[in-house]
Amino acid sequence: MSRSTRAAGRRAAPRASRSRARTHRARTASKAIGLTLLSALVPGSGLLMGGRKKLGSFILTISIGLLLIGAYVGLTHRDSVLALLVSPRQLLIATGAVVLLGIGWIWTVVASHKLLRPVSMTYTSRLAGSMFVGLLCFAIAVPTTVAAQTVMAQRDLIGSVFQSEGNSKSATRPKVGNASDPWAKTPRLNLLLLGADDGVGRTGVRTDTVIVASIDTKTGDTALISLSRNWMRMPFPEDSPLHKVYPDGFWDPSMGNVEQPEYYLDAMYENVPKAHPGILGQTDNEGADVVKLAAGAALGLDIDYYMQVNLAGFRQIIDALGGITVNVNYRVPIGGDYGAGPGSNSEKKPSGYIEKGPNQKLDGYHALWFARGRYGLSDPSRQERQRCTIHALVNSANPQALVTSYQQIAKAGKQLLRTDIPQEILGAFIQLALKVKNAKVANIDLDKNKNFPSGKNPNYAAMREIIQKAIAPKTAPVASTATVKPTRTPTKAPTSGSTKRPTPSKTTTTPGAAENLNDACAYNPSETGTN
């Protein structure tokens, strides 16, 4: 073959290649833009239409495969999804995967447009195509970035609030057995909810809100039990070192049978660790362990875990959720101080009031005072409002609010929560929380008039009997109770419904019975909040 013939062949080859490439290109810039949009909606399709059939088929197969796998896992393997959501290591891997998928998606769109656009284009057409591709890339980059930030916010929340069993210390929590099914031998889980009142201008940390949530681990049915902040003589289990120090409960007999504010339930969190540091052994929160032991002994329950709520973070959570809707049966004070008791300042009047009315939408500030306000009102009315606030908060946690505001919720959660729940069982806790949201939530009336007309000497034995009857299963004994094996059938509460629908009156509850929170939190303007 002559030199001229070989040269001619080399010159002819590029023309053939360019000719084949042109056959896959759009004839107009507008059609190229349309095909580029299709390539963004169906990753890989643009590469197929542009002639890169092997690469396009691979990306299209991967895209469809990921969608199918995601749908399958989400519908049939919820446990795996929950485990991912509470594992810092897996969340970090998920963040990397989200970023890589976003980058790959953007590259696919850009490469598809380059293959599909006409060879000959005017400056205006080229500019329009470039701007459209840039807009598509931006539309992909924004949700990818938000998704990555949300996953990292979740990871930060889990790592900040929940520690593994090996990296945290508790003097009272049970050992983790089977992490995949921790409730296998626990018919009821008893969770202590603490509201820590450590605001500006207040002295020390007090637990003005003390509620025990006793949860049926099979059904999610929950009984809420409120403890009065001014209870004295709080007992301790006989096997606790604190029982030796306070054999007759937390009070000072030398002062006589009088009100002793420094020995109230709400003062235990701070005063007992101050007086006896380290008495319970190694723990990350001695105050919470003290209250767990005392609340369990008083109510006849073994308290498994605690969740301590910082009230400032509580306000931020409600704002992030867009507020809560409650029925306000009487005027609730904003602020105000009697000038007596632990942490009190000089006496002052409330700065304002939340006026009564049905279905009121409250922001974080007013929701906090709806739960806390007590000036001129009774402690039982305050406890009921606290339970109604929790009920409204659970009902407000809808998927839309969680998706749109999750980063703010996670940020507030870091300031809001302190707990001894270990990371190892978070997946099981989330599953249980989903059951609780759709189950019956009732309040157990401890009969104030009979058992604690004042806080000086409550009848804890009578309260324990009420609780045992209210939460007792029909056949099996309650594993997490500390005293008598129950044999009575629990009082059944009415079917749960929406708290947003006002009712003309509220059902009268027999002392010692369980009352559904939908009834307890219904609108009843005849209430005064003073009894």
Image (cartoon, rainbow, N blue to C red):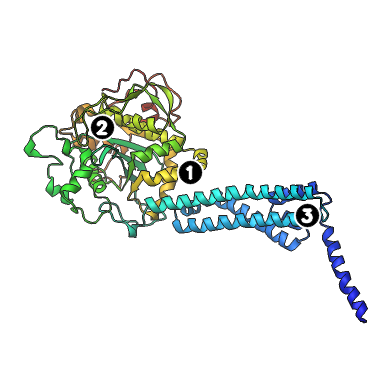
**Marks 2 and 1, the one that precedes in the sequence:** 1
Above or below, comparing residue 193 to residue 420 in the picture? above
Secondary structure of residue under mark 3: helix
- Residue 335 visible in the shown view: yes
Q: Give the x, y percent position of residue 140.
A: 63, 49
Residue with the mark numbered 3: 116
Above or below, comparing residue 132 to residue 495 in the picture? below
- Foreground mark, 2 or 1, reads 1
Give the Cα distance between marks 3 and 1: 39 Å
Q: Give the x, y percent position of residue 231.
A: 20, 35
Classify 10 Å Cα crowding around label 1: few (below 14), some (14-19), many (20 and above).
many
Q: Which residue is the extreme one toward the front?
A: 123
User: What numbered label is drawn on residue 508?
Assistant: none
What residue sits 73% from the left and 56% below the top? 112
Q: In which quarter of the image is residue 47?
A: bottom right
Say which of 91 and 305 sits in front: 91
Give the Cα distance between marks 2 and 1: 37 Å
**Marks 3 and 1, the one that precedes in the sequence:** 3
Type of the residue with mark 1 = Tyr
- Foreground mark, 3 or 1, reads 3
Residue with the mark numbered 2: 446
